[in-house]
Image (cartoon, rainbow, N blue to C red):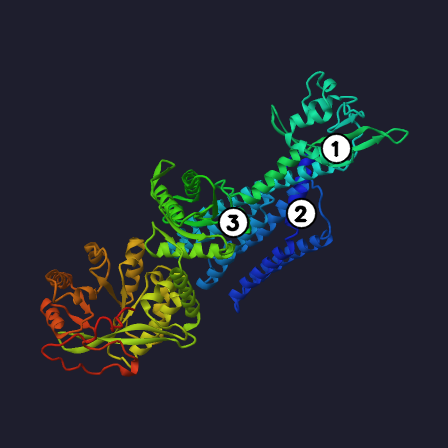
Amino acid sequence: MYNSDEHEMALLRGAHLTSVIRVTPPMMFANMGSGACILLSFYPAIPTGLWIWFSVLTLICALASWSWWHIRDKVLATASARRIKRSTLHAAALAGTWAIMIILWFPQAGALQQMTIASLVTGMIGAGGFVLSPLPLASLVYVGLYTLASVLALLTCLVLRAEAHYLVIAVLLMLYSPMMLIGALLSWRKSSELIRAQRQAARQGEMLSVLLQDFELDAGDALWETDRNGMLNHVSPRLTELLGLQPGEHEHKHFLQILCERSPALCYLVDDQIEQRQSFRSLPISMKDEHGGRHLTMTGKVLLDEQGRFAGRRGIISDVTDKVNNERMLRTLAHTDSLTGLANRFKLRDTISNLVSRDSSLALLSVDLDRFKSVNDNHGHSTGDALLQVIARRLTDCVGDNTLVARLGGDEFAVVVWPVNSSSEPTALAQQVIDCLSEPVTVTEREFRIGASVGVSIRLPGGQHLDDLMVQSDMALYASKAAGRGCWSLYSEHIGEQSRRRLAIEDGLRHAIERGEITIHWQPKVSLATRQITGAEALMRWSHPELGRVGPDEFIPIAEQCGLIESLGHYVLEEACRAATNELKGLTISVNVSAMQVQFGHFLQELTTLLQRYELEPERLELELTESVIIDDPDQALAMLTAIRQTGVRLALDDFGTGYSSLSYLRTFPFDTLKIDRSFITELLTRPDAQAIVRMISGLAMTLGKRTVCEGVETVEQLAAIRAAGCHEVQGYLISRPVALEEFPTALPEWPETSQPAQTPGQAEGDAD
């Protein structure tokens, strides 16, 4: 592409260069806007050198825009190798200008300024590498200069500030940029193949509209002519080649007989067009030869003698094999997943639409791999792609006849089965798919166990349409994942109602705080040693205008899945800090924190900001976390929890005893408090093993210098057993249910010697956050 002088390469260069020139205005606008953002981030103390740099950037963008303006209405049919190399210099100049800014000003910038520069650079690398992908050398130079300048700037910051995260970011950048270049090269290669295929198809189409001038020797098409009896008058070498005629065959066979022997489907058109002595165009002829399939088209007209009587026919036969194959390839590319060779989403929808239009019974299985993301994260996308290819082959071998297997994207697949006689058929196939995909998969000498979840929706004659069927299948798949994965679910009205309720909850959560629907209730904690209220736990309550009260055990997981947990968690944390310095001053305030809050976002920064804003002593705030924050990535969790504990904020391990409860957690992680789960307290008086567990946890905590809190205390007898076990604090309905701030008790109730539960289990609201 960069060195050849062939006309074909010149056409390819012209097509690629035109696609890049078309996006010049938005690209230059993006560069100018990004440069303005850099200036704004340094405002008001903008260095003089930065103004000079912005002026140079403006000049480069203006020149590029001026050049585009003069050729905006032109389509470059061809482009020289020299011209396409100049585009590489233009890309280098633009990237070099940015590289100078990165090297000179990034190391000196503040944290927010560095974040602005880093965000812009990351975006420019991705956007520029993609936009320049039709010119691979320009894309390589562009991304390379950005990456080199960024790595140099990060290493300079590492030397100047001795902060390890600069090295981490540099390593990530060096991993990200090559993947960007590989993607650009693959995009260029695929687009080049499509351009060639389209040009070849267009060329073959043009051949059909032009009368050939040389029919006998070197022409691509062949002339044929018959007499009034249907016998060929003359056979050219080209006609012999196209039809594969044997020596002397045309002398004793009619021309129509020769054609029908080679293309039986042609016989059905003989009576309508040929025998009726009518002219015809583009009559298709498909035949087999030693090279495989060959596709011809035949055009003919009736010949009349001087008296107007029928004298035969004359026409041309054209070889359109390449055109047909190219069109098939384009259709295949449009309906096939390039990685696995399966049908894609468009082919799936087309197949279901055709079945629905025929009112056929069918079943749609939505298949989602259960542990695929960890393969990509830990072993790279190349391994993940190879794994998907193996999964695709397994699915194809597993499903049998009258099925279509499609890949929808990522690790999502779909299977269409038709016809369906009973619901047991698709559900049996769903279990078969699960069993098949649960078998170990060996890729690059590694063994993986993936597994899958399946959602099934069935359409009977007269049933639902395409979109409804796909929505129901997705709902059933979600139910399978919610049930623990590795299983299948058949869509039912109950699942539909659950899904609609979940969507209503998700939609309501987006505005629940600003509408004042989320309130905080407070449940006191009592010290068994002093019999005084020493703390309070902040618990969220939500009253939905249509659904009524929605429990936190229902809306918290949904908030985590749809990315709303950070805003909810920040609201509760801020309200806890505010109350701790006002109405609940002097008490230790406990706040439940989701694992997703700690692992992602800027939780530590938000925490320190709130402590400073409300001037709250850190030891007066206690964060309650479950073991889920530890299990996924213990090393990252340890670093984060240690950083939180260094602020002075206390940490509590919630629901202790119900999960893994590894003793190594207590030795390694900086927890101050163990919260004994309410399930042990409920059974404390009826099961000796529950008493033993509570005593064991209490003794273990005392030995390790940690406090214990028992939640869910409802009777005096439970309280006595907890006190005997040596626990430090309790909370539950015996003391107070969670109440609004204005109802928070200032003194403890009088406890009789014995009591009934404060509230029956069926009425209890629970202490869940």
Q: Position of residue 374 (x, y in %)?
A: 37, 48
Q: Are marks 1 and 2 in contact (CB under 8 Å)?
A: no
Q: Residue furthest top?
A: 247
Dot 1 falls on a residue whose secondary structure is: helix
Identify residue type, mark 2.
Thr
Along the viewing direction, whichever of 581 and 311 lies nearer the viewer: 311
Choose top left, top right, bottom left or bottom right for residue 26: bottom right
Residues at marks 3 and 1, CA–CA distance in whole angstroms: 39 Å
Along the viewing direction, whichever of 278 and 240 lies nearer the viewer: 278
Is residue 99 visible from the viewing direction of this image? no
Is residue 640 visible from the viewing direction of this image? yes
Name the residue located 19 percent from the left edge and 68 percent from the top edge. 709
Identify residue type, mark 1.
Ile
Q: Which residue is mark 3?
A: 352
Q: Position of residue 207 (x, y in %)?
A: 74, 35
Q: Which residue is mark 2?
A: 18
Count of marks overlaid on the render: 3
Q: Indicate which disc residue 274 carries.
A: 1
Which numbered disc, 3 or 1, marks the residue that appears first in the sequence? Answer: 1
Mark 3, other Cα within 10 Å: few <14 / some 14–19 / many ≥20: many
Horizontal placement of 229 versus 364: left or right?
right
Horizontal placement of 183 versus 20: left or right?
left
Identify residue type, mark 3.
Ile
Q: Residue furthest right?
A: 306
